């Protein structure tokens, strides 16, 4: 018996409701008593404190060798540790908990705990809850809403039968006389009673939860069993608009080639549309589904859905839009403990039974899947993919690749992928969008130039189009359009940069000065290791990173994205810019890439040069001219017929006279002074 229970269920006079919260910190849990989530939670824990209207006690579950265990109420009344039988977890309703409190505190206690250790004045703490115990059933609706009153009567009847058997056998120290004491206590409760069976009564508000519409309409028990358990209002109402396919926009660019590829995905288990924000993933899907008339279950995910119970609630509701008879969770309540895989197993079996003879294909679309980071949800989706029913297809639209077995599916030919390179507008599509949809008076050459500057990024084209409306000089605007435009900067900061962790933001801002990125170069510019892992993350997360080779060694940022980052870096940390360029210049110089080293040296502001300490000699001018032409020391020595040591001496003399340290700085400074 726990000394201090980890959880507390208490009556709140302020809210006029029972609230479940953790005893340490008083964190309120989003679990409604008598809901499916409540019974699932009860099956996972071993104890909790109850503070009701009639008294307080600690409820503890005692497991026998077989079975799920029985619950008992413990309280120290008049110095004696007293025990009351509560029943199985499925019977832990509010009326039963209040009845036990009334027995313990309002009636004369008659059953002190006759057991070794009764001198203990406090209850022992319950064991810490495990990761497996944290799995909850979907809190989509109260099971009480789904059960008919006949179902409730059977459940209460079974509870009474078990109580009588345990009384007769003396289980847990209870005596047959206690049954009469409980009945008397129940009759004296302050609640007005509404009978459910001949032996049980509950308050009207509780009884109403067990009134199923099927009973009021006179339906038979067989009819009631076929009704979907999720067809009634949930405990926490679900947002219905998340379960509908977004309507295609009245004026959009139809993309028949991509729609044809999606249609070919009906031969695959998973269709993955993975691209950065603003590449038209959702628009493409809605256009495809509207034009193909494929049956669909749609779910638009939000950050709040990154919780197993809520995710499963919406998933079940989405599948019910395809088939209202799917998603019965009544069977799952008896599993110990219930898990996400158990619920998915019920769903898969239902699909196989109900749709086994159907010839139509249907798709389950999860839009904005990048908001899901909970590992148990990823595992559940992997389980669904592994056991996907025939003719069912999963579609994920996401800004980043999910941690699913993509390589395995790719190898099995069960994966269709559409990425940013597939989704960006072609020149023809960009012209259609700018001229026909947006109504801009542009020539084909001007639209092609804007498509090139945005690299086909649809949102970039749209932002440019908004700025072009009403302008008399579209050509000048398009020529000057870049990522530093305030529309682009604001959008990318809000939708991309600000959504990243501090470490990712630092990496992006420190490396945005580079035209090409590799792990060693980024390490040198940042003056720290770990750039390869960060580049791998950026590639998986689709953070506007473009691969330049098949080996994954060289990358670049999308041009508008890089320009927006540089604009933000100049505004927030201008003093850091010269240091970053000089580090890049030094790395390029060490690897013999003089031209790139010089470009970064020129990009780093240097103090204005003063007068030369002394003028350059004729030989030094010759050496300087060859340096400007990009010649190495060996090439200079061969051209001027000098030894290597002599060439190095001339270079050192030139550095001293120009007051610089490296040859790249010599070249950069020579281009600003009339030395030759």
Image: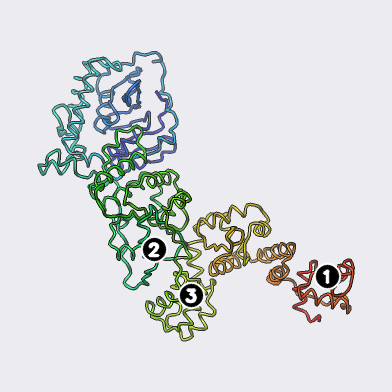
Vertical order, 84 against 33 (above or below): above
Label 1 sits on residue: 655
Packing grade of label 3 (10 A; few <14, some 14-19, many >=20) is: many
| 56 with respect to 594 (left or right) | left
- Residue 658 in percent (x, y) is at 82, 73
Q: Are marks 3 and 2 in contact (CB under 8 Å)?
A: no
Q: Secondary structure at mark 1?
A: helix
- Colour option used: rainbow
Q: Secondary structure at mark 3?
A: helix
- Report the Cα–Cα distance between label 3 and label 1: 45 Å
Position of the N terminus, as image quadrant, is top left
Marked residue nearer the N-terminal end (2 or 1): 2
Packing grade of label 2 (10 A; few <14, some 14-19, many >=20) is: few
- Residue 245 in percent (x, y) is at 31, 60
Furthest-bottom residue in this view:
472
Q: Quadrant of residue 531?
A: bottom right
- Residue 143 in percent (x, y) is at 25, 40
| 256 with respect to 667 (left or right) | left
Q: Quadrant of residue 437?
A: bottom left
Between 200 and 50, the one lying in front of the other is: 200
- Residue 113 in percent (x, y) is at 33, 16
Label 3 sits on residue: 451
| 364 with respect to 547 (left or right) | left
Q: Quadrant of residue 651?
A: bottom right
- Label number found at residue 261: 2
């Amino acid at each position: 018996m726990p000394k201090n229970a980890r959880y507390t269920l208490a009556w709140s006079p302020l809210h006029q409701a029972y609230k479940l919260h953790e005893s340490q910190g008083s964190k309120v849990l989003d679990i409604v008593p008598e809901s499916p989530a409540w019974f699932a939670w009860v099956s996972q824990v071993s104890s909790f404190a109850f503070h009701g209207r009639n008294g307080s006690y600690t409820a503890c579950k005692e497991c026998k060798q077989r079975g799920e265990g029985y619950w008992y109420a413990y309280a120290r009344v008049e110095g004696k540790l007293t025990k009351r039988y509560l029943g199985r977890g499925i019977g832990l309703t509010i009326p039963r908990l209040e009845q036990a409190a009334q027995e313990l505190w309002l009636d004369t206690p008659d059953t002190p705990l006759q057991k070794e250790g009764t001198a203990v004045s406090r209850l022992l703490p319950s064991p810490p809850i495990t990761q497996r115990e944290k799995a909850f059933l979907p809190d989509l609706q109260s099971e009480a809403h789904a059960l008919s009153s006949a179902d409730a009567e059977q459940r209460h009847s079974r509870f009474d039968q078990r109580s009588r058997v345990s009384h007769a056998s003396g289980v847990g120290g209870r005596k047959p006389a206690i049954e009469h004491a409980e009945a008397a206590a129940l009759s004296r409760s302050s609640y007005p009673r509404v009978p459910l069976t001949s032996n049980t009564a509950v308050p009207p508000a509780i009884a109403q939860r067990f009134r199923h519409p099927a009973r009021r309409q006179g339906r038979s028990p067989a009819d009631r069993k076929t009704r979907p358990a999720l067809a009634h209002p949930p405990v926490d109402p679900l947002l219905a608009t998340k379960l509908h396919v977004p309507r295609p926009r009245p004026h959009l660019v139809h993309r028949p080639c991509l729609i044809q590829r999606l249609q070919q995905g009906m031969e695959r288990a998973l269709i993955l549309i993975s691209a950065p924000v603003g590449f038209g993933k959702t628009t493409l899907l809605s256009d495809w589904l509207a034009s193909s008339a494929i049956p669909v279950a749609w779910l638009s995910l939000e950050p709040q859905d990154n919780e197993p119970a809520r995710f499963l609630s919406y998933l079940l509701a989405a599948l019910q839009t395809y088939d209202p008879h799917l998603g019965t969770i009544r069977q799952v309540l008896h599993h110990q403990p219930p898990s996400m895989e158990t619920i998915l197993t019920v769903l898969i079996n239902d699909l196989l039974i109900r749709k086994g003879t159907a010839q139509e294909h249907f798709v389950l679309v999860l839009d904005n899947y990048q908001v899901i980071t909970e590992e148990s949800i990823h595992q559940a989706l992997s389980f669904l993919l592994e056991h996907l029913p025939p003719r069912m297809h999963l579609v994920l639209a996401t800004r980043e690749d999910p941690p699913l077995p993509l390589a395995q599916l790719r190898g099995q030919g069960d994966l269709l992928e559409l990425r940013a390179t597939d989704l960006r507008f072609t020149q023809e599509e960009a012209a259609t969008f700018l001229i026909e949809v947006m109504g801009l008076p542009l020539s084909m050459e001007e639209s092609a130039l804007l498509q090139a500057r945005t690299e086909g990024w649809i949102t970039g084209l749209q932002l440019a189009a908004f700025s072009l409306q009403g302008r008399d000089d579209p050509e000048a605007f398009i020529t000057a359009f870049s990522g530093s435009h305030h529309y682009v900067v604001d959008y990318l900061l809000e939708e991309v940069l600000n959504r990243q962790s501090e470490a990712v933001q630092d990496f992006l801002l420190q490396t945005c000065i580079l035209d090409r990125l590799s792990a060693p170069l980024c390490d040198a510019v940042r003056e720290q290791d770990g750039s390869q892992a960060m580049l791998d993350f950026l590639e998986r997360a689709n953070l506007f990173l473009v691969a330049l080779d098949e080996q994954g060694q060289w990358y670049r940022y999308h041009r508008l994205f890089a320009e927006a980052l540089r604009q933000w870096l100049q505004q927030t940390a201008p003093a850091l810019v010269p240091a970053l360029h000089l580090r890049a210049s030094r790395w390029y110089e060490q690897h013999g890439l003089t031209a790139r080293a010089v470009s970064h040296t020129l990009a780093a502001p240097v103090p204005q040069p003063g007068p030369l300490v002394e003028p350059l000699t004729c030989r030094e001018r010759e050496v300087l001219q060859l340096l400007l032409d990009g010649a190495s020391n060996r090439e200079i020595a061969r051209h001027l017929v000098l030894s290597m040591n002599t060439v190095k001496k001339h270079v050192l003399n030139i550095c001293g006279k120009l007051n610089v340290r490296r040859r790249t700085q010599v070249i950069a400074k020579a281009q600003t002074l009339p030395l030759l």
